[in-house]
Image (cartoon, grey):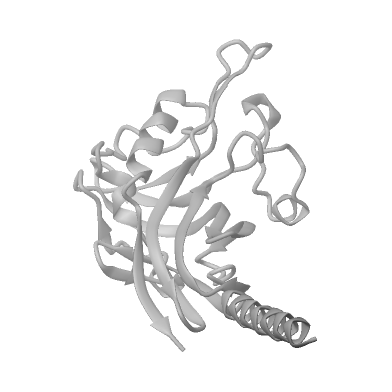
Amino acid sequence: MKKIRYIFFISCFLLTACSEDNDRFLETVDVTFRFTQNWEGIPITASDFNEFKFTNQNGDLISIERLRYLVSNINIGNEVKDYQLIDVGEGAGLEFVVNEVTKGLKTLNFTFGFTNEDNLEGSYQDLNSVSFNVPELLGGGYHFMQFDGKYKDHNNQDANFNYHVIRAADNTDPTNVILEDTSFEVDLGELELNSSTVVEIKMDVSEWFKNPNTWSLQELNTRLMPNFAAQKLMEANGQSVFSLGEIKYN
């Protein structure tokens, strides 16, 4: 009988210990993601739009009229948010919360744009409603970024630019459009989550024009969507655009 009681006592002890370990393992926090934009470290908000106040690597003086972009598969640990449209001019989508992320060391990464697997024509009603689609003659699907504004041309006159990033499409033969996935993954490293956290993700807009390709708006300004080579340049320049900003623990 004493032996049975001893075994029962040990079993209860082990079950309690395991339960406590599981409780600690399952402790969760909320993570707020905040997207900010800057030009070589100078903050950009909607109040900076429609003014010639930025100069790119090529020396082109520009003003911003619209800036909105898409990120997807936002992954913090094992928690994933499908996608987020950030519209700087409207102040929409700049912040969102991922709830119940387990505590501990977590990796943070996301995709700029949609991968081919997710870039499905007409699949996202909220993106359809704000005209973020790509025409079918360019393969359909969705924009990755719409960045519009004006620049001063060689005659110091205002000229339009439409820096629109999409999946690269060669429609030289309209019956056989050649597509290449030009989305890319952004890896922001690891975060230690011990309490609810606010994570800043920074976009340096100037990088779209300079690294590794110096972009001349005098040459590449509008009609960039059907320009396969231009889309490849955009993909390359986008690799250095995002970085991890300030992290606040609540």
Quadrant location of residue 190? Answer: bottom left
Image coordinates of residue 215 in percent, x first then y, are: 28, 39
Q: Nearer the viewer, residue 212 or 246?
A: 246
Identified at 25% across, 44% down, the residue is: 210
Q: Is residue 130 visible?
A: yes
> Residue 90 sits in which quadrant?
bottom right
Is residue 62 among what the camera can see? no
Please give the name of the residue rendered at 24% of the width and 51% of the height, measured from the top-left corner.
Answer: 56
Residue 139 lies, in percent from the top left, at 65, 27
Task: Please determine whether, in this image, residue 201 is positioned above or below residue 230.
Answer: below
Q: Is residue 161 above or below residue 53?
A: above
Residue at 53% across / 61% down in the picture?
77
| Residue 188 falls left or right of residue 72 | left
Q: Using the rendered view, name the quadrant where residue 121 is placed.
A: top right
User: Image point 46% across, 24% down: which residue?
Assistant: 228
Q: Quadrant of the N terminus?
A: bottom right
- How far across and how far down the image is residue 62, in percent? 31, 54
Give the answer, above or below, for where 10 lies relative to 234. below
Looking at the picture, how far across and down is residue 61, in whole percent? 26, 53
